[in-house]
């Protein structure tokens, strides 16, 4: 086994080993449990950094395990995989810190952190998967690892949400599985990047290729929470806040979005997708999700539900960017994978902190809360304004590239979708920010739970609960401000499009 | 020498166990488990190195002698059996209620029958082995001692014996047509001969009864849920599996020339109905053991689906065959694990209703987690090796153009999720603090450790799928050996 | 009509009678008897097929049938033993009571 393969396995082991160790520890050994979880997370960030340097220097990371004559488990690292894996590594570290603080009094932490670590292992596997079979294996593992997190509280609402989640995801998996098997039955086994196999189908069996794409895209869209397959996501809001953060920003919806990116770029390829006419339907579907998700978000009255529908809307930006099938749009979609992760996880950290520190869960409770938990609300405001796409924040960069991408391929209606979405984002985020900073709390002078004085400085009061949000919000700010630098997510996305996919330009007309 | 370990040793230990006092039984059983496992591993090494071989029993040449085969698929099944048996022995040794002395030799006799069925290429020998296995297995049901168990037991006995006699009738007809009893006899005569078809029909029918295929399944759920948990584990994981494996071998080997599309489709339809019917019944039960027992009815249906796919021949037949055997071993390990989990639940919660699972994932985490792993294997999801099996079956179905079999294969997984996650969801319910502390006090972690070891095996085998599929090899079911 | 065919057809008749008793009767002892009649029929067919040729009868089926009889005796003994315990436990000799299905 080569050193490169070992490094890949080590990347999985960073969270798998803590999962197993935590499962074996007593409920009461909190300190050791936290050490393992955090240790794994830190180690993973270091490994990913090392790997990034390796990839830049031209090293090739691959690990394969044959299962039967025609079936291989294959892990490998390309620039796109690194994009996703670095996102998950950084956000996992932040979420671990936050989760440990948020769940400090939870009675079943051992179970929680076991599956929490499993969940990250599965996400890493999805990022590193080198062929369709491996992708599916980790995609299913992710379902299995997140189910216990959704069901964690063990009350009726949680179990109902878990049941709904399982129904949606398994139905999606069946569609994905049929699509994968059918495609490989007519094209042969496909490793990511072997787009030539599907390209040949364009001549021989275009209809079957389109149906397979539809099946796989539908299966992936369930986890990606595209309308109308999104209902599980708001229901899963009953889970603890770190779970929501993880589901929304790193793991589940991102797995769906990442899967669609892989499907278009590495299974079908840009040219075959163009020839088969897959771009426009996908773009329309993504646009529909963007608008519908935002409209429903407007009508929610709890913070977490509103954020959930906002996720439904925002994740589809990634699909939109890919569906344009042009280089600039692609950069916009890929960079939004990172930007949305950073901003949305901040929002969920803040929602959790608001709930824990100020007792706020509903939007009508938010009046004046900014002065009671200033750091939290500051991070919240930065992330929310970023989501709306105001310059110079991260969301603006995404939307700018998406818009340019639309113009580039001559789809001017994309601009209208983006403008409409921005308007709706503003409509559902600005009232929260306004209420938090500029309205007085109901019954001025009567502090809620007597916490008003005590929490004047929430960052000092509950550092591990608030700091992750502040740090990630800063990162989101930096990703926007320094988008032009060499180390920004934008630069990496451009590198992916430039180096890995070499999207042909100008478009053949 | 290898056959002495696989068949002679359990037979000898059964006799020895009948004569020795209770305190010797556990060491004796573990010695047996070690011996058989060693024999099977030695066999596997030999098969991987030198290929499979036919060994006439006692050195008498065919057609007079009895043909045993040492080949990959049989050894894979025997290794699976060893794992289940070892876990069962461990459970019996550790469980708080004592297991009667008379039970031990019966367990060993079941093992004699199983290992013979996995290696025999002789139809009459298979009949005797099936009867040894069934009668010893049925006698074990009586240990739970309830009137309900007795009723289930006698039903099982009557139906199983009837099935065996129908099988024997088929064997007699085959002997009448060919003058031989080994599986290679059929190749000598015209596959269109009516006597051969009638013989194949009787043999198949007899085995369908023995393996509790729909509509001959009604005896299974009361019998498997009526026995004590470790016995249920054997019955459900192995005793119905061995005849099913035999049927699969017959239809991929000696009956393959007469595999009319209609016969394959008929068996496939029976399998489909079994999957749907067994799963729906499993959803409606409120005793954990009955859920698991009905699940067996459903899961055995998959093995029947393999038959129409194998009839395609070529590479597709190999996919279906490997998928079928992988499914068989996954189901064996997971099913035995789940029954032992039900046994541990009885110890921990004092009952084995579905509601007795409440709060187990917190108060008896290893038990709750093991149930989850078992359910994942039944659903055929990764990281269980059952997923590889299911993937291969689906590929066989889609690549052969018989895409309709993909519907029960995938639908069965969803149905298994429905009845399986129903159990898992209950383990996640919080329960009261009092209940949790009562569960914690009564729980026996060593029992759960055994359950966990068993249900995690399919997960480990996922990574070892390459050597496993090399061992399972390709069709025909007897590996194309010649005596 | 040759002798072996007579044996074979009476064997078939016994199989039918045995199946009838096994499936349609409720009384346990009758069912067990049905099983034995069924077994006898199968054995008769087996032996008849062995005697089909012109020369002396094929000896192998005789050995097989003896083995089969031993198995059948074991099965019958087990069935009777369970029946006795079932009778002691419930006072009934039929399994037509509230079904477990």
Image: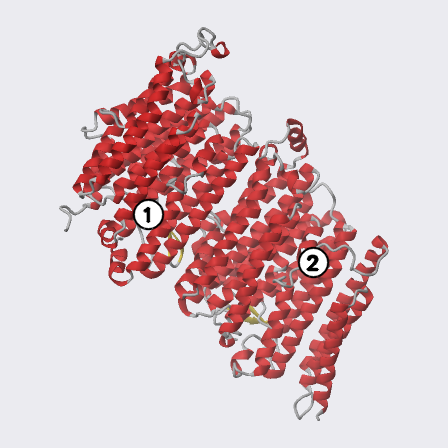
Circles 1 and 2 in contact, beta carbons < 8 Å: no
Which mark is in front, 1 or 2? 1
CA–CA distance between discs 1 and 2?
47 Å
Pick the residue in front: B307 or B78: B307
The disc numbered 1 marks a residue on which chain? A
Residue A224, given in percent of the width and then of the height, sits at 37, 40
Q: Within 10 Å of the Cα at label 2, are there few (<14), some (14-19), or many (20+) other Cα atoms?
A: many
Residue B238, given in percent of the width and then of the height, sits at 61, 57
Q: Name the residue under label 1.
A: A130
Q: Mark 2 points at which residue?
A: B137
User: Looking at the image, can residue A79 be seen?
Assistant: no
Identity of the residue drawn at 54% across and 50% down: B416
Pick the residue in front: A114 or B90: A114
Q: Is residue A363 above or below residue C18?
A: above
Disc 2, SS: helix
Callout 1 and callout 2 share a chain: no
Residue B142, given in percent of the width and then of the height, sits at 76, 54
Question: Looking at the rendered structure, which numbered label has been put on residue B173?
Answer: none
User: Looking at the image, can residue A462 be seen?
Assistant: yes
Disc 1, SS: loop
């Amino acid at each position: 086994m080569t050193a490169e393969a070992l490094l890949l396995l080590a990347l999985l082991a960073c969270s798998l080993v803590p999962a197993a160790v935590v499962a074996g520890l007593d409920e009461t050994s909190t300190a050791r449990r936290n050490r393992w979880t955090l240790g794994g997370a830190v180690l993973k960030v270091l490994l990913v950094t090392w790997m990034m340097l390796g990839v830049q220097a031209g090293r090739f990371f691959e690990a394969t395990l044959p299962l039967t004559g025609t079936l291989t488990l294959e892990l490998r690292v390309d620039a796109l995989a690194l994009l996703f894996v670095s996102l998950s590594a950084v956000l996992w570290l932040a979420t671990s810190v936050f989760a440990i603080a948020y769940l400090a009094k939870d009675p079943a932490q051992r179970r929680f952190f076991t599956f929490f670590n499993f969940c990250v292992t599965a996400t890493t596997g999805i990022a590193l998967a080198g062929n369709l079979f491996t992708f599916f294996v980790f995609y299913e593992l992710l379902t299995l690892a997140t189910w216990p997190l959704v069901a964690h509280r063990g009350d009726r609402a949680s179990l109902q949400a878990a049941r709904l989640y399982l129904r949606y995801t398994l139905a999606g998996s069946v569609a994905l599985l049929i699509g994968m098997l059918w495609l490989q039955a007519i094209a042969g086994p496909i490793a990511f990047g072997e787009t030539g196999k599907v390209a040949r189908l364009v001549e021989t069996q275009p209809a079957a290729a389109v149906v397979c794409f539809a099946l796989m895209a539908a299966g992936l869209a369930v986890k990606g929470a595209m309308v109308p397959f999104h209902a599980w996501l708001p229901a899963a809001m009953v889970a603890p806040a770190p779970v929501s953060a993880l589901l929304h920003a790193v793991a589940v919806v991102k797995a769906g979005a990442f899967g669609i990116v892989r499907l278009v770029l590495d299974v079908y390829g840009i040219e075959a997708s163009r020839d088969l006419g897959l771009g426009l339907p996908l773009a329309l579907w993504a646009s529909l999700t963007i608008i519908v998700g935002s409209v429903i978000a407007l009508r929610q009255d709890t913070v977490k539900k509103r954020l959930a529908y906002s996720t439904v809307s925002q994740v589809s930006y990634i699909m939109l960017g890919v569906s344009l099938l042009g280089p600039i749009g692609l950069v916009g979609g890929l960079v939004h994978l990172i930007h949305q992760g950073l901003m949305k996880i901040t929002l969920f950290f803040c929602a959790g902190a608001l709930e824990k520190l100020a007792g706020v869960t509903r939007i009508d409770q938010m009046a004046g809360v900014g002065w009671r938990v200033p750091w939290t609300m500051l991070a919240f405001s930065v992330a929310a304004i970023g989501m709306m796409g105001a310059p110079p924040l991260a969301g603006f960069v995404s939307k700018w590239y998406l818009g340019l991408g639309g113009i580039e391929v001559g789809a001017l209606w994309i601009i209208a979708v983006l403008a409409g979405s921005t308007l709706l984002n503003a409509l559902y985020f600005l009232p929260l920010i306004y209420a938090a900073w500029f309205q007085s709390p109901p019954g001025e002078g009567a502090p809620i739970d007597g916490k008003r004085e005590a929490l004047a400085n929430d960052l000092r009061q509950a550092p591990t609960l608030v700091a992750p949000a502040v740090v990630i919000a800063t990162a989101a700010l930096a990703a926007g401000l320094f988008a032009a630098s060499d180390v920004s997510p934008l630069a990496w996305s451009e590198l992916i499009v430039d180096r890995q996919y070499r999207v042909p330009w100008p478009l053949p007309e | 020498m290898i056959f002495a370990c696989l068949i002679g040793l359990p037979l000898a230990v059964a006799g020895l166990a009948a004569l020795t006092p209770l305190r010797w039984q556990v060491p004796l059983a573990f010695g047996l488990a070690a011996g058989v496992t060693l024999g099977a591993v030695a066999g596997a090494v030999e098969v991987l190195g030198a290929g499979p071989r036919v060994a006439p029993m006692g050195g008498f040449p065919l057609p007079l002698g009895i043909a045993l085969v040492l080949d990959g698929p049989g050894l894979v099944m025997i290794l699976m059996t060893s794992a289940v048996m070892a876990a069962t022995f461990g459970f019996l040794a550790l469980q708080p209620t004592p297991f009667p002395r008379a039970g031990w030799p019966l367990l060993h006799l079941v093992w004699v029958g199983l290992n013979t069925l996995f290696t025999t290429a002789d139809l009459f020998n298979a009949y005797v082995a099936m009867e040894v296995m069934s009668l010893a297995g049925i006698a074990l049901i009586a240990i739970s001692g309830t009137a309900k168990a007795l009723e289930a037991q006698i039903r099982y006995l009557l139906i199983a014996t009837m099935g065996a006699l129908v099988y024997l009738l088929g064997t007699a007809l085959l002997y009448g047509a060919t003058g031989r009893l080994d599986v290679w006899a059929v190749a000598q005569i015209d596959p269109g001969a009516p006597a051969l078809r009638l013989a194949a029909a009787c043999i198949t029918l007899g085995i369908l009864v023995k393996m509790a295929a729909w509509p001959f399944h009604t005896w299974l759920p009361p019998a498997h849920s009526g026995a004590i948990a470790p016995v249920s584990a054997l019955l459900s994981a192995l005793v119905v599996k061995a005849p099913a494996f035999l049927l699969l071998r017959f239809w991929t080997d000696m009956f393959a020339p007469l595999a009319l599309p209609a016969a394959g489709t008929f068996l496939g339809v029976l399998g489909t109905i079994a999957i749907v019917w067994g799963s729906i019944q499993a959803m409606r039960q409120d005793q954990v053991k009955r859920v698991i027992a009905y699940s067996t009815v459903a899961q055995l249906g998959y093995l029947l689906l393999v038959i129409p796919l194998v009839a395609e021949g070529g590479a597709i037949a190999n996919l279906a065959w490997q998928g079928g055997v992988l499914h068989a071993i996954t189901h064996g390990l997971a099913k035995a694990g789940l029954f032992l989990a039900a046994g541990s639940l009885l110890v921990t919660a004092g009952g084995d209703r579905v509601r007795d699972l409440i709060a187990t994932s917190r108060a008896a985490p290893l038990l709750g987690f093991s149930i989850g792993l078992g359910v994942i294997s039944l659903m055929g999801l990764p990281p269980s090796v059952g997923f590889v099996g299911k993937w291969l079956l689906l590929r066989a179905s889609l690549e052969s153009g018989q895409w309709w079999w993909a519907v029960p294969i995938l639908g069965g997984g969803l149905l298994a999720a429905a009845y399986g996650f129903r159990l898992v969801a209950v383990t996640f319910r919080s329960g009261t603090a009092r209940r949790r502390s009562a569960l914690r006090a009564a729980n026996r972690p060593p029992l759960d450790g055994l359950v966990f070891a068993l249900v995690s095996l399919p997960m480990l085998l996922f990574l070892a799928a390459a050597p496993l599929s090399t061992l399972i090899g390709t069709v025909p079911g007897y590996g194309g050996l010649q005596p | 009509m040759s002798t072996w065919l007579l044996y074979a057809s009476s064997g078939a008749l016994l199989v039918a009678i045995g199946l009838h008793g096994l499936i349609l009767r409720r009384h346990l002892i009758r069912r067990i008897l049905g099983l034995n009649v069924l077994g006898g029929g199968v054995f008769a067919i087996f032996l008849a097929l062995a005697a089909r040729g012109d020369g002396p009868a094929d000896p192998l089926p005789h050995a097989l049938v003896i083995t089969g009889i031993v198995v059948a005796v074991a099965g019958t003994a087990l069935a009777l033993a369970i029946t006795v315990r079932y009778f002691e436990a419930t006072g009934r000799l039929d399994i037509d009571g509230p079904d477990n299905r």
